[in-house]
Amino acid sequence: MVALILLRHGESTWNRENRFTGWTDVDLSPQGVKEAHKAAELLRDGGYTFRVAYTSVLKRAIRTLWIVMDDLDLMYVPVHRSWRLNEKSYGALQGLNKKETAEKYGADQVHLWRRAYDVQPPPLPWDDPRHPRFDPRYADLDPETLPATESLHDTLKRVLPYWESHITGDLRRGLPVMVSAHGNSLRALVKHLDGVPDDEIAGLNIPTGYPLVYELDGDLKAVRHYYLGDPDEIAAAARGVARQAGTG
Ligand SMILES: O=C(O)[C@H](O)COP(=O)(O)O
């Protein structure tokens, strides 16, 4: 059995302000920093460690990982960053307040944008300065592959090749792996690991800062998975995520 630890970054400044974030590179809030330290404590208390770490190219996930590695005295562990682990692109919704968006477009529409498997939010126009093609961190990528918006399905389609080509190799070698990423890139991974049907994934909400441990067998089938931390607190935090737009 090998452990895969999934960790959604601690609360970000835009989580705090209840804004759609997506590929916007905002940092952790002071609360998010505390959540990252708490995640490290939960891992230490549970006797968990990791030999390799993966994260996105967004600082809220990177900083969460740094804090965990520092607190666990694991700063030497190799870290791989990839845009493929970034949050789902929220396109033109990025920056907008979730509740105000629900008031304007209706709670049902916002729920579809947030949680439906195959629905894309409105795209960023090609010339919008926020389009990732203008961001130097993606300069080596074909601009046509960079998303102007994404459904969860689109997110899964770019997460999976990285899972297969990089992460599974370490797990097959028996190395425990940490993935510090985002609400929706992790929902995509969980959908794959647990074989969650398309129409059921809308009900899954991942809270910030609680390690989600998967025990995988030799074929990398998920045998068991569980959060570390107080179950009532975690359930309340997941309900809080579901209700960010006033719905759920
Ligand atoms: O990008 C965001 O706004 C959040 O990180 C995830 O948002 P969601 O829970 O609305 O999908």
Image: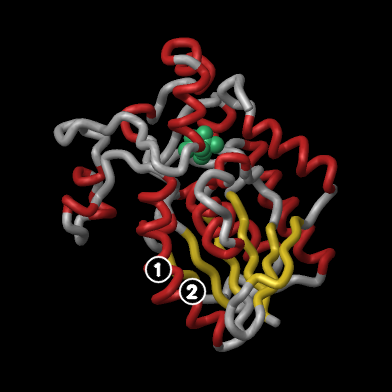
> As drawn, is 229 to the left or to the right of 115?
right
Along the line of sight, the residue nearer the viewer: 40 or 228 = 228
Circle 1: is it few (<14), some (14-19), or many (20+) Cα within 10 Å? some
Mark pair 2, 1: CA separation = 7 Å
Residue ranking furthest to the bottom: 173
Residue 76 against residue 93 in the figure, above or below? below
Residue underneath mark 1? 162
Asked if one can make out residue 135 in the rendered structure from this viewpoint, the answer is yes
SS at mark 1 in the image:
helix
Q: Quadrant of the C terminus?
A: top right
Q: Are marks 2 and 1 in contact (CB under 8 Å)?
A: yes
Residue underneath mark 2? 167
How far across and how far down the image is residue 106, in percent? 47, 15
Residue at the spot 52% in from the left edge and 81% down from the top edge: 170
Q: Quadrant of the N terminus?
A: bottom right
Circle 2: is it few (<14), some (14-19), or many (20+) Cα within 10 Å? many
> As drawn, is 191 to the left or to the right of 74?
left
Asked if one can make out residue 24 in the rendered structure from this viewpoint, the answer is no
